[in-house]
Amino acid sequence: DAGVTQSPTHLIKTRGQHVTLRCSPISGHKSVSWYQQVLGQGPQFIFQYYEKEERGRGNFPDRFSARQFPNYSSELNVNALLLGDSALYLCASSKSPTLSYNEQFFGPGTRLTVL
Amino acid sequence: AQSVTQLGSHVSVSEGALVLLRCNYSSSVPPYLFWYVQYPNQGLQLLLKYTTGATLVKGINGFEAEFKKSETSFHLTKPSAHMSDAAEYFCAAFLQGNKLVFGAGTILRVKS
């Protein structure tokens, strides 16, 4: 079975632009979470979606938004990009909406560079 | 504030030596705890997790971790390091509702 897939692998944008990152969960997984990993730091939770509904949100500005589609794939959108948005964006999928003890499976990430 | 702290951003060991990566959490209630490994240009892979029950948890690739409530710690160990263990390791905990909070990571270097 395929793991969590993310596209694109790398992306270069300029300040002020908009970006859309995509994630396909493992087959059968209905929960998708997004994380931002800035160089030299651990991942930080951005959003969790389960069956198209937002189930959790981290401390990120409103420039960050996400949605989940009927096939459980997900998009993360970031508007008005800042230099500080440069990071590795990780997507993780899980079977259950309760993440506390259910394992999350991570994708390889999308490396976003903002110039 | 609730947090996860990893002591030492870089750890270097010789091949065959003991690996010890330290993790402490800050929470009044013992959380569920995890260790993840990240190889270059790859996503995170779960090594092991502690939820309830036995405080010594065994994971993949010979790693294990012990939950010590009195010390609010969850240190990761491996008796004998292998070159393939070189990677970045992250400790994580569920501290704030349905959110996984990660430490800053420890880069493990294994010398031949």
Image (tube, coloured by chain):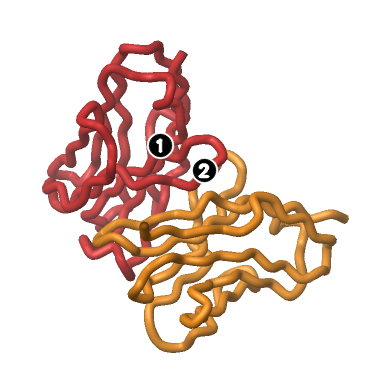
Chain colours: A red, B orange
Chain letter of the residue carrying label 1? A
Which residue sits at x=48%, y=36%?
Answer: A38
Number of residues whose C-alpha sits closer than 10 Å to that of mark 1, classed few (under 14), some (14–19) or many (20 or more): many
| Circle 1: residue type | Tyr
Where residue B57 appears, as percent x and y from the top left, is 52, 80
Is residue B31 shown above or below B83?
A: below
Q: Are marks 1 and 2 on the same chain?
A: yes
Residue annotated with mark 1: A89
- Quarter of the figure with residue A99: bottom left
Which residue sits at x=39%, y=45%?
Answer: A44
Where residue B14 appears, as percent x and y from the top left, is 84, 61
Is B12 displayed left or right of A3 in the figure? Answer: right
Point out the image quarter for the C terminus of chain B: bottom right
The secondary structure type at the circle numbered 2 is loop
Q: Please name whichever residue, A76 or B107, is drawn nearer the observer in this view of the structure.
A: B107
* Real-space CA distance between mark 1 and mark 2, rounded to the nearest whole angstrom: 12 Å
| Circle 2: residue type | Gln
Nearer the observer: mark 1 or 2; the answer is: 2
Is B29 displayed left or right of B25 in the figure? Answer: left
Which residue sits at x=47%, y=42%?
Answer: A108
Q: Residue furthest front?
A: B1
Q: Please name whichever residue, A5 or B19, is drawn nearer the observer in this view of the structure.
A: B19
Q: Residue furthest right?
A: B112
Residue annotated with mark 2: A41
Number of residues whose C-alpha sits closer than 10 Å to that of mark 2, classed few (under 14), some (14–19) or many (20 or more): some
Where residue B79 appears, as percent x and y from the top left, is 74, 75
Q: Residue furthest bottom?
A: B54
Is residue B20 shown above or below B10?
A: below
The secondary structure type at the circle numbered 1 is strand
